[in-house]
Image (cartoon, grey):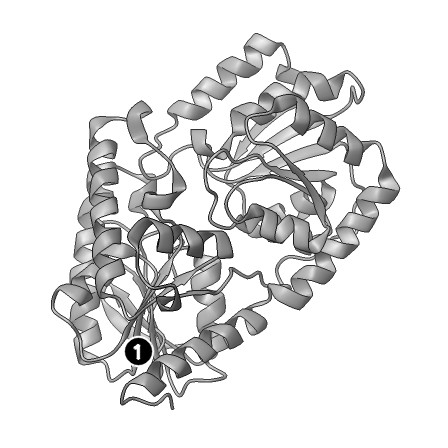
Amino acid sequence: MVSSGWVPILPGKGVLYGGGIEAQVYGLSKALTKYCEEVHLVTVQTESHTEQNTEGIIYHKLTLPSKMPAFESMIKLAYSDLMFAYKSRRLCQKLDVDIVHCNTKFPAVASLLKRLKQPLVFTAHNWKLWEGIRPEWKNSFARTAFELDVRLERFIAQKADKILAVSGAMKRGIVGSTGMPSERVEVVPNAVDLDVFYPEVVERKHIILYVGRITAEKGVDVLVKAMPLVLREASDAKLVIVGPRRYGFERGGFEEQLMKLVRSLGIERHVVFVGSIPVSDLRKTYSTASVLCLPSVWQEPFGLTLIEAMACEAPVIGTKVGGIPEIVSKTKAGLLVEPYNAEDLANAILKILLDTRLARSMGRKGRRAVKENYTFDSVTQKLYSTYLRLLEQGSGTVD
């Protein structure tokens, strides 16, 4: 399977499913095999074919211009989006499934333009109409893509049978930005695999960790600006930034701005950019860190890295935006700060760094909260219940 924002998955005879983040797509598909007679998953390979693995998932591997277009060029990304939508729709027409579930916009719109016979469910992993991002600082191609994205969202809101939001804040944003009935939007959060993310037995150091896309809306520059304030009281602290240098419309320009900021603040010895790392290394990094920071300045839909860190018993700090407070406030696994406020962020970091008892307590609460609310088993139960309610309104039944 390919970890790329545009690559879908199809669960079915029961369900046809499309996905964004590899972990979400694969984890939910695997869990759905407990409920559905068949689970189909569409991904990308050099040669198109179908195969079934030992976990009961039927893979449909489609040929596209690139396996990882988000890491290559914007033209390849756009072309691959369109080709994937076209090939996915044709496959949907052939498969005998009860529900079509898309996690990316192009396949959803392709299916809705000429309606398939099955109900269509769409999971919104982002919603430009609500998030408050404006691409003025990016290039003209990105701005055009942004406007197209907004048009796709309006169309999906009008035509989809059910929209799934990953947080309550996102649901309110979708309803408020489109005027669609609230009952057509349900909340199904993201999840983590506890067999992948767990605390390793390693010493926690004064490492402040950021994991995610290195873009302006994530507020990583605010985190960098907080470091000199942190270093006044914790001189051995180090900021580790994990994330791809090139992804989608962000081609590395913002990371270069951050590096200049680091140099201007004179904190080069205390900030490390490590790029993308394997999951096994990421788990160890979460387990070693004193705190995971997600200083987003946009309406962050969920914040997957928060629950990954919590699963590894790392305390977390997030901003009071989007769906972040729903995770942090509810679980007591960390602290919330105001967006754009480097001083507020620095004070929260120091509170955790300098109080090991508090940090351990937050870590344990975070792990417990993930077990109770954010496993693939628990989230899939919500997803399957949504399918059942939708099918009860129509003529189909889930096998």
Numbered-mark total = 1
**369 left or right, relative to 101:** right
| Residue closer to the observer: 180 or 265 | 180
> Which residue is rendered at x = 19% and y = 35% of the image?
144
| Residue closer to the observer: 276 or 21 | 21
| Above/below status of 72 relative to 17 | above
> Which residue is rendered at x = 39% and y = 68% of the image?
183
**147 left or right, relative to 355:** left
Identify the residue at the far right of this view: 357
> Which residue is rendered at x = 55% and y = 26% of the image?
340
Identify the residue at the far left of this view: 114
Q: For residue 353, what is the image quadrant?
A: top right
> Which residue is rendered at x = 58% and y = 72% of the image?
378
Give percent across and percent down for residue 28.
47, 69
Mark 1 lies on a secondary structure that is strand
Which residue does the numbered mark 1 point to in the structure image?
99
Residue 37 visible from this viewpoint? yes
Quarter of the picture holding the C terminus: bottom left
| Above/below status of 193 relative to 366 | below
Give percent across and percent down for residue 329.
67, 50
Quarter of the picture holding the N terminus: bottom left
Give percent across and percent down for residue 116.
17, 75
| Residue closer to the observer: 168 or 3 | 168
| Above/below status of 233 relative to 289 | above
**56 left or right, relative to 208:** left
Give percent across and percent down for residue 354.
84, 31
User: What is the crowding at mark 1: few (fewer than 14 residues within 10 Å), some, or many (at least 20)?
Assistant: many
Type of residue at label 1? Ile
